[in-house]
Image: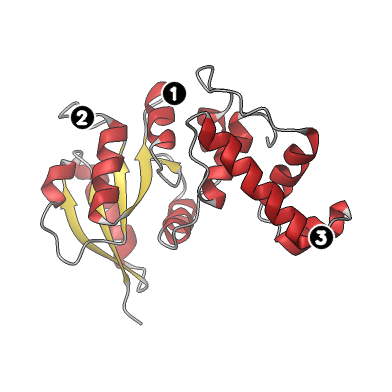
Amino acid sequence: MEPHRIALVEDHALVARGLEALLEGSPDLALVATAETVSGLQGLDPAPRLVILDLRLGDGSDPAANVAALHRMGAYVLIHTGAEDRALVQSAARSGALGLVRKSSDPSDLLAAIRTAVRGEAVFNADWAAAIDADAHLEDARLSEREQQVLSMYASGETAASVADALGISRGTVADYVKAIRRKYEAVGREAASRVDLYRRAVEDGILE
């Protein structure tokens, strides 16, 4: 099996070398490119599956714009930062990054986060949840109590069948609730197309911690 292609956008050489050394010992992961800016990865073919992105780059670029540019390349994005700027993290979260890992994290935690993100799965941790929780600018989707119950279970990773069993309803009814939840979020301009999106919405609205 070919290793997953990883790229890094990082303008601190010491951090870049440390990550390169970490990935060298991981046969399932291959660091194929390192750049100081997102534009430095343009033209990489094939595109990396995952880009590890420094939140605050020396060129002053906007994190949300950087995440969007990397998505257009076809890459997932994992934020790797030492910054404490919550507004920047919220901006990256709303743009669809899969999670955040601190530069001070243990190497084993960083590797676990990379392996999760490279599968296209969200990296759930306290830093990420705290950053996206209770954003004052978010529109209320006005979910019913039952919709909130369904969302809390489904967004946590429960299957439609397990949600149905727990609530005493059919799988079809669960599917209808999920569709209704997505419509309500999308009606107020909040992405809800994927389960990861629904998890973010649930955290933002205090439905999940």
Instruction: Report the quarter where the N terminus lies.
Output: bottom left
Which residue is denoted by mark 1 in the rendering? 86
Which residue is denoted by mark 2 in the rendering? 61
Whichever of labels 1 and 2 marks the residue nearer the N terminus, that label is 2
Kindly report the distance in space between the C-alpha atoms of the residues bearing marks 1 and 3. 40 Å
Q: Residue 170 carries which label?
A: 3
Name the residue: 44% across, 47% down: 98
Name the residue: 53% across, 48% down: 196
Whichever of labels 2 and 3 marks the residue nearer the N terminus, that label is 2
Classify mark 1: residues with Cα within 10 Å, few (<14), some (14-19) or many (20+). Answer: some
Q: Is residue 96 left or right of residue 19?
A: right
Please state the horizontal and vertical placement of residue 137, each as a whole percent of the image.
Answer: 50, 18
Marks 2, 3: nearer the viewer: 3
Instruction: Report the quarter where the C terminus lies.
Output: top right
For residue 126, say whether it is visible. no
For residue 116, say whether it is visible. yes
Amino acid type shown at disc 1: Arg
Whichever of labels 1 and 3 marks the residue nearer the N terminus, that label is 1
Mark 1 residue element: helix
Classify mark 2: residues with Cα within 10 Å, few (<14), some (14-19) or many (20+). Answer: few
Please state the horizontal and vertical placement of residue 88, each as a whole percent of the image.
Answer: 37, 26
